[in-house]
Amino acid sequence: MSSPVTLSVGLLLVAWGFADYLFPQTVLRVQSGLLNVPSEPNDDFADHKRRVGLVCILAGIVTLVLTAD
């Protein structure tokens, strides 16, 4: 990937990760409204969303570090 594309992907992953980690219930409500699954987000999904958020943040940071090289 070219550097601007890689930078954009890294920033998108970090932003998505922070949204998932900080506001999991809100993100789940928006996603359920768009996808109709699950109909009612619960705490188990919110906990999973926080873990996914951490993975996205880490993947985005790694991508940004690799872009800097």
Image (cartoon, rainbow, N blue to C red):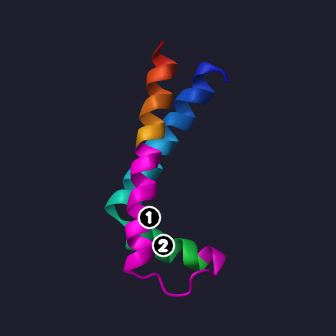
Kindly tell me whether residue 15 is visible in this rendering. no
Taking the spot 42% from the left edge, 82% from the top edge, the residue there is: 42
Q: What residue type is labelled 1?
A: Lys
Of residue 67 and residue 30, the one placed in the foreground of this image is 67
Residue 32: image quadrant is bottom right
Kindly tell me whether residue 31 is visible in this rendering. yes
Label pair 2/1, CB-CB below 8 angstroms: yes
Taking the spot 38% from the left edge, 61% from the top edge, the residue there is: 50
Please provide percent x and percent y for residue 43: 37, 79
In the rendered structure, which disc, 2 or 1, sits on the residue that comes first in sequence? 2
Residue that label 2 marks: 28
The residue lying furthest to the left in this view is 22
As measured in the structure, the alpha-carbon distance from the residue carrying label 2 to the one carrying label 1 is: 8 Å
Q: Which amino acid does label 2 sit on?
A: Leu
Please provide percent x and percent y for residue 15: 43, 47
Taking the spot 65% from the left edge, 21% from the top edge, the residue there is: 2
Q: What stretch is highlighted in magenta?
A: 34-57
Please provide percent x and percent y for residue 11: 47, 37
* Disc 2 packing (10 Å; few <14; some 14–19; many ≥20): many
Residue that label 1 marks: 49
